[in-house]
Amino acid sequence: MSPENKDVLENGTVKHLESGPLFEIDETELARLDERPLPIRTERRRSFDERSFGDIPMTLSSPRHFHRHDDTLSPMYDHFDSIDSAGRRSLASTPRSSSCIKTHPLVAEAWESLRRSIVYFRGQPVGTIAALDHSIEELNYDQVFVRDFVPSALAFLMNGESEIVKNFILKTLRLQSWEKRVDEFKLAEGVMPASFKVRHDPIKNHDTMVADFGETAIGRVAPVDSGFWWIILLRAYTKSTGDMALAELPECQKGIRLILTLCLSAGFDTFPTLLCADGCCMVDRRMGVYGYPIEIQSLFFMALRCASVLLKHDEENKEIIEKIVNRLHALSYHMRNYFWIDIQQLNDIYRYKTEEYSHTAVNKFNVMPDSLPEWVFDFMPNRGGYFVGNVSPAKMDFRWFCLGNCVAILSSLATPEQASAIMDLIESRWQELVGEMPLKICYPAMESHEWRIVTGCDPKNTSWSYHNGGSWPVLLWLLTAACIKTGRPLLAQRAIKLAESRLLKDHWPEYYDGKFGRFIGKQSRKNQTWSIAGYLVAKMMLEDPSHLSMISLEEDKLMKPLLKRSASWMC
């Protein structure tokens, strides 16, 4: 590799830069946002859609569940480490902790590794790189990914370090507003980058930020989820710090509008779900998720709910807020009815009639009962259920996708009954979904002829590897959050103990292979930052459940179900 293709971070790590038409901005272009003073408001605002969990009194009770009485949360700690008397910053080995509580030695190692991954722009921390593994070619793992940074950001926020999160939000916002092209085609204005990197010229002492909107990604797919994660992170920052000033900046308000305008624009759709290509989310390679993947729909729903809180209710935002409210009602109804499956629904699909016409049709998407895979009959417990991977005309992808189901719980897309059923499924199918390393990104894996056709013979997505049934430690934080919200902290503790037994000695791998996650992924990076951050977030959240408020939304009781018949039906 030639010298001009190398770069040096302020933390001393060497980055290998890819050639190609990456979008680039100069430091002077970011000065306008940085120069504007932000009035920091330290008091917690009450304009949110739910109370802060940090304000809720905690009492000791039965160790089995979190019981809800009058919107209060009573965590049971008989099986946990004690929390400090202040009930604030958690974990003895976190940098800001002054507690002497005994905690796992892995925590200190995780924080040290997380800090080594920090990237600086003009002396300010702006994110964390994907992985610090120099043993193999770095490709784009030396970049700051929007989705990858979310668990890192949550860890910093939980530890009272908000500066890096604020800087990240502003820098990615600035990147959003620039014109971006893939070959000769211009992308929409609101698209958020998949990732960015900082190039440092040691001679001129000059930093340049470089963004990737999909034009150099494998498969050249623009990320749909980046914008959603950005909105969710902005709400988490606001919820954690009480600083509404950042979200109320005209630039941030415009950024939210641009992201959602792309998704809420009128078209030929008859569904409220969002049509997406393969490779547009965490499953960023061809895996048969084209259509309406559960991950995107859950993130879309959560971003809409966060945006409804963050947007100022003024004349400029009136139209977009009305669209958000209408879409939330339609999307919640559609997902809860058509994406949900349990033993009763499985029986109904098994007996579906096809070629039904008119508004009275039961099999609305003309799903063929013969398309039901054999594995789903054994996988479905008598108690439990989940949101399937995809629903579209004549297609129902019955695979379990972890991220989509966990986000459905956290966003309250899942009703309380559905959230409880999802956790019942995880508990009853623990060996298949958790195994020896949390947590399966999807289940089951595609094999043989199906793998060849659907993945295009992708050698990285062979059976039980990477996105095709691999186990991803980063998902631990989402599982923990879902467990706490549904009152099952012991499940989270069990999963965390599994991870603690291997993560450090395996050097924090990106993913694990095998039906039960026994083997380090064949192309897995070591020192994967979001594996590190995911563990820290899970650990801190379990010790102090008040942190859950950053990433959880309570059920909107005003969201009434729509009529089951078509709106165009006439008596």
Image (spheres, grey):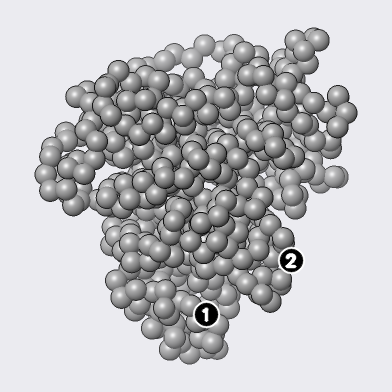
Q: Mark 1 points at which residue?
A: 373
CA gap, disc 2 to disc 1? 21 Å
In the rendered image, the residue lying farthest to the front is 505
Residue 81 position in % (x across, y down): 24, 36
Q: What residue type is labelled 1?
A: Pro
**For numbered disc 2, what is the local secondary structure?**
loop
Residue visible at 14% across and 45% down in the picture: 70
Q: Name the residue under label 2.
A: 456
Residue 227 position in % (x across, y down): 57, 41
Which one is in front, 344 or 523? 523
Q: Is 280 located above or below residue 367 in the figure?
A: above
Count of numbered badges drawn on the protein? 2
Q: Is 377 located above or below residue 209 in the figure?
A: below
Q: What residue type is labelled 2?
A: Gly
Residue 132 position in % (x across, y down): 63, 33
Residue 289 position in % (x across, y down): 61, 63
Q: In which quarter of the image is the C terminus?
A: bottom left
